[in-house]
Image (cartoon, rainbow, N blue to C red):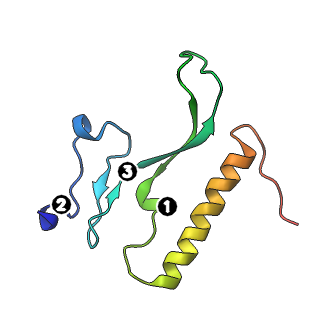
């Protein structure tokens, strides 16, 4: 079963998300679309829509490597955390802050 899933792209009627999620070869990890956003008290169109999506990222672009290299994985974790925190702190309408 695991061998069959390597590289398998989910069909749109099952995936129900953009960017064709697939199972990565090597570790069989699902690479879905990641939705980065912020919570809101009340939605614009639907009052129960409590999450506003600011960025949609392809899972393969932000996921840790499929390799089992601890140093690489730690660097990847820190980078992903920095990206998420940057987007949360700045919001979709804020210009990027310069580093000092």
Q: Is residue 8 left or right of residue 61?
A: left
Q: Residues within 10 Å of mark 1 (few under 14, many from 20)?
A: some
Q: CA distance from mark 3 to mark 2?
A: 14 Å
Say the numbered circle drawn on residue 54. none
Task: Determine which residue is flagged by label 3.
Answer: 32
Q: Return the x and y of residue 83 as percentages of the image width and height.
A: 63, 58
Identify the secondary structure beneath mark 3: loop
Tags 1 and 2 in contact by the CB under 8 Å rule? no
Q: CA distance from mark 1 to mark 2?
A: 21 Å
Tags 3 and 2 in contact by the CB under 8 Å rule? no
Tags 1 and 3 in contact by the CB under 8 Å rule? no
In this rendered view, identify the residue nearer to me: 40 or 52: 40
Give the residue displayed 63% in from the left and 21% down from the top.
42
Say the numbered circle drawn on residue 62. 1
Task: Determine which residue is flagged by label 2.
Answer: 5
Q: Is residue 4 left or right of residue 13?
A: left
Q: CA distance from mark 1 to mark 3?
A: 10 Å
Q: Residues within 10 Å of mark 2 (few under 14, many from 20)?
A: some
Q: Return the x and y of residue 55 as percentages of the image width and height.
A: 56, 43
Return the disc, 1 or 3, that comes first in the chain's sequence.
3
Identify the secondary structure beneath mark 1: helix
Q: Return the x and y of residue 90 as percentages of the image width and height.
A: 74, 46
Return the disc, 1 or 2, that comes first in the chain's sequence.
2
Identify the secondary structure beneath mark 2: helix
Instruction: Give the farthest residue toward the right.
Output: 100
Vertical side of 24 occupied by 69: above or below:
below
Give the residue displayed 31% in from the left and 63% down from the top.
29
Vertical side of 22 occupied by 77: above or below:
below
Give the residue displayed 46% in from the left and 69% down from the top.
64
Return the disc, 3 or 2, that comes first in the chain's sequence.
2
Q: Residues within 10 Å of mark 3 (few under 14, many from 20)?
A: many
């Amino acid at each position: 079963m695991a061998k069959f899933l390597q590289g398998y792209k989910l069909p749109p009627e099952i995936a129900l998300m953009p960017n064709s999620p697939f199972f990565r070869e090597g570790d069989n990890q699902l690479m879905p679309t990641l939705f980065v956003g912020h919570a809101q008290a009340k939605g614009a169109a639907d009052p129960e829509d409590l999450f506003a999506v600011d960025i949609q990222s392809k899972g393969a672009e932000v996921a840790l490597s499929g390799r089992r290299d601890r140093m690489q994985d730690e660097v990847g974790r820190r980078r992903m955390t920095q990206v998420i925190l940057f987007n949360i702190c700045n919001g979709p309408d804020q210009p990027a802050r310069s580093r000092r």
